[in-house]
Image: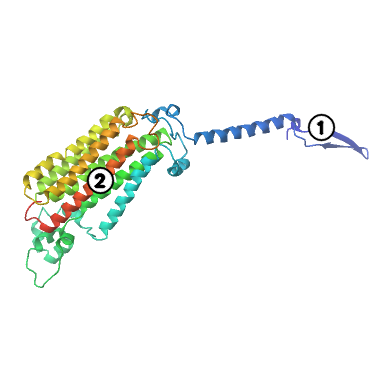
Amino acid sequence: MNTSELGPVWKRKTGGMTNTTTLLIPSETAVKDKNKNKNKSKKKREKAERSYGLVSFQELPEYMKDNEFILNYYRAEWPLKETLFSIFRWHNETLNVWTHLIGFILFLGLTFANLMHVPQLADFITIFTRHFPTSTEANFSHNSKEFLLRPTKLIDLKQELPFPMDITPPEVAATQWPFFIFLGGSMFCLLSSSICHLFSCHSHHLNLLLLQMDYVGIAVMIITSFFPPIFYIFQCDPHWQFIYLGGITVMGICTIITLLSPGLSTGKFRSFRALLFVSMGLFGLVPAIHALVVNWGEPQRNVTLAYESAMAVSYLVGAMFYVGRIPERWKPGWFDLAGHSHQIFHVFVIMGALAHYGAALVFLEYRGRIGCDRNI
C-alpha cells in the first residue's frame, strides 16, 4: 500500500512500547483519481448514447454519404446488437428493410404452398439426362425410368394404359425445378437486400461486404427469372434452352465479377450499376421475340405477354426512381423517413417479381397440359 495515500498516523505508548495506528482516510490524490475515473465513465456512457442516436447527412462518415437529398435520420457506426434491434426503430432505412423483408416472407410462403403440391425432387437432374440417351437406356424397365424421371410422363400419358387411370396432367407431367429456381433466386435477393439495409451502418468493412452481397442478389434474381419462361417455352428445343439460359448465366456472372470491385460500390457509379442490371433484363428481348414468332397463334400468348410486360414495366419504372432519386431530389428532407426513391424502387421490384410469378404459373400449367406436341 502506498503510505502517501493514507491518512494521518497517531502514536500512543502502551507499557513502554509505542503502538502506531494508521487511519485509512483517503488522501486528496486518491479522491481526485476516483472522481476522474467516474468522469471518464460518464463521458464514455454519454458518447455511447450519442452514437446510438440518429444523425444528419453531414455527420456521416464519408463511406456512408450516398444520397445527399436525404438529410436526416441516419444511423452511423452502431454496434451490431443496436443495429439488429433498430429494425423496430424509425430511421431512414426502416421501410427499406421491411419492404423487402415482407417480400421475402411472401415468396417463402408461395414456395411452401407450391412444394406441398409438387414434391418432384428428381426433376432438377433430368435436364442433363433426358436429351442424351445412351445404348444402355433401352435395358431399363419402363416403370423404373418413369419413377426416376417423371418428365417422361409427358409422352407416356399419350400411350394406351392396360387399365383406366384418372390422371391430371399439369400436376403429374410438368417439370418443376425451373419454377423453384426462380422462387429461390427471388428470396435470396429480397433477404440479402433487407440484411444490407439493416446492418450496413455498422462499419466500413461490413458496409462494403453487404453492398456487394446486395448486388449479387439482384444479379441472381435476374438470372433465375429467365429459367421458367425459357425452360418451358423451349422445352422441346433443348439447344435453345442451352443457348439462352447459358447466355444469361454467363452475362450475370460477368456482371457480378464487375460489381465486386470495391470502387464500383460508391454512389458515383449508381447509374452504371443500374445500366448493368437493365442490360441483363434487356437480354430477355431476344428469347421473347423468338417465342412470339414461333408461338404467335397460341391462346396463352396474350396472358403471358401481359404478365411479362407488367414485370418489365415495374422493373424499369423502379430503376428510373432509383437512378433519378425521385421525389427527394425535388424536396430534400421531406422524404427522409418515408417515400424516398429507394423505398419506391423496392415496391416496384416486388410487384415485378409477383408479375413474373404469375407468368411462370401460366407457363408451368400450359406446358404440363400439352407436353411437347407443340410449343407454347
On the rendered structure, is 336 left or right of 17?
Answer: left
Mark 2 or 1, closer to the camera: 2
Quarter of the figure with residue 139:
bottom left
Q: Residue at x 9, y 43 (%)?
A: 290
Mark 2 to mark 1 CA distance (whole Å): 82 Å
Tell me: residue 116, above or below residue 89.
Answer: below
Residue under label 2 = 353
Amino acid on which disc 1 is placed? Pro
- Residue 274 screen position, x and y as percent: 26, 33
Q: Nearer the viewer, residue 149 or 60?
A: 60
Residue 216 visible, this angle: yes
Q: Tag 2's secondary structure?
A: helix
Query: Quick one: 95 or 220, which is closer to the camera?
Result: 95
**Which residue, given by chain and number where applicable, does mark 1 sit on?**
8
Question: In the rendered view, how is the structure colored?
Answer: rainbow
* Amino acid type, mark 2: Ala
